[in-house]
Amino acid sequence: MGTPKKTPPKFRTEAEERAFWESHDSSDYLDWSQAKPVRLPHLKPSTTAISLRLPISLLERIKIEANKRDMPYQSLIKAWLAEDINQLRS
C-alpha cells in the first residue's frame, strides 16, 4: 500500500487529459490497491452521428427486419454492427 509518487497535472481540456493518460502509466499517479468498484447505472456512452450511404434495396430490407422486431431501423443496424464486431473479437 504505497503512496502515489507523482501528482497528475491540471488539464485545460478533456482532449489534453486523454492524450496525457494515453502516454503515461496511471500507477505512477494512483494507488490502485485502494481502488473500490463503482457502479454508474445512468451513465450513457458518448455517441456521434455518422453518414452512411446504403443501397435503397438494402435499407428497405433492413427496415422490414426492424419492423418485424418492432424497433427503429437505426437501432437494428447498431445491434447488428455491435454483434459482428463482438464476433470478430472472439
Image: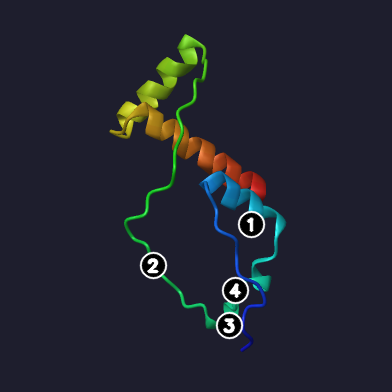
Quadrant of the snapshot with the N terminus: bottom right
**In this view, the mark in front (1 or 2):** 1
Q: Earlier in the sequence, mark 1 or mark 3?
A: 1
Q: Mark 2 falls on what kind of element? A: loop
For the residues labelled 1 and 2, say whether their Cβ atoms are less than 8 Å apart. no
Q: Which mark is residue 30?
A: 4
Residue 25 drawn at (x, y percent)? 69, 65
**In this view, the mark in front (2 or 3):** 3
| Tag 3 residue | 33
The residue drawn where x is 49% and y is 36% is 80
How far apart are the alpha carbons under marks 2 and 3? 18 Å
| Tag 1 residue | 21
Q: Is residue 46 above or below residue 60?
A: below
The residue drawn where x is 59% and y is 73% is 30
Q: Is residue 88 above or below residue 2?
A: above
Q: Is residue 46 above or below residue 36?
A: above
Disc 2 marks which amino acid? Arg
Residue 20 drawn at (x, y percent)? 65, 54
Q: Earlier in the sequence, mark 4 or mark 2?
A: 4
How far apart are the alpha carbons under marks 4 and 3? 9 Å
How far apart are the alpha carbons under marks 1 and 3? 19 Å
State which quadrant residue 71 falls in.
Answer: top left
Report whether 32 appears left or right of 41: right
Residue farthest to the top? Answer: 56
Q: Is residue 75 above or below residue 22?
A: above
Q: Which mark is residue 39?
A: 2
Q: Earlier in the sequence, mark 1 or mark 4?
A: 1
Disc 3 marks which amino acid? Ser
